[in-house]
Image (spheres, grey):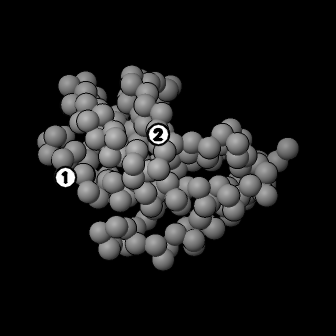
Amino acid sequence: MYSKEELKQLKTDFWNQFKVQMQKTRSSNGRRMNWLAYPSEVKDIYIRVDADGKGARLTFDIQGKDAGVRQILWEQLYELKLVMEQEMGTEGIWIENASTPTVPIFNRIVWERSDLNFYKPEDHPEIINYLADRLIHFDAFYQEFKDILINLAM
């Protein structure tokens, strides 16, 4: 078990290592990216990477308060599901009307590897490779279709 300080250092070291690996990787549109704060360019859409004791994951969240806009974006993504999954190389888990204590209702697509454990340092290289690969493939899809989502969200 890690102390609070050790856990903070472990997380800091891991995400810094991830940033270093990704800093030379450009977006599919040729621009530099802050991969840890992926710019969706759409209000209330968040692309996040995460790792913990239960696995490593990339999530695409639609958190808009307007249920109609959230539903339109969700339906459009569902129409692009086959294209998205071809680019990602795997199916995502589609969760409509999810909730957390901080976000009462949202829609989520998640790509996850549950066989990895962040608290096992020997898993860190595989977690980094998995998250990097997911982000690069997601970016190729997103750069191609983001304008559709931007226009629908307006």
In the image, residue 118 above or below residue 102: below
Locate the C terminus by quadrant: top left
The amino acid type of the residue labelled 2 equals Glu
Residue reaching furthest bottom? Answer: 24
Name the residue rendered at 49%, 45% in the picture.
90
The amino acid type of the residue labelled 1 equals Asp
Which mark is first along the chain, 2 or 1?
Answer: 2
User: For the residue labelled by badge 2, is the local secondary structure a helix, a strand or a loop?
Assistant: loop
Question: Left or right: where does residue 19 sit relative to residue 107?
Answer: right
Locate the N terminus by quadrant: top right
Which label is found at residue 10? none
Question: x, y (%) of residue 64?
Answer: 29, 33
Name the residue rendered at 21%, 31% in the picture.
72
User: For the residue labelled by badge 1, is the local secondary structure a helix, a strand or a loop?
Assistant: helix
Say whether residue 64 is visible: no
Name the residue rendered at 46%, 38% in the picture.
92
Say whether residue 93 is visible: yes
Which label is found at residue 91? 2
Which residue is labeled 1 in the image?
147
Question: x, y (%) of residue 42?
Answer: 26, 47
Foreground pick, 21 / 154: 21
How far apart are the alpha carbons under marks 1 and 2?
23 Å
In the image, residue 60 above or below residue 67: below
In the image, residue 39 above or below residue 63: below
Name the residue rendered at 44%, 61% in the picture.
136
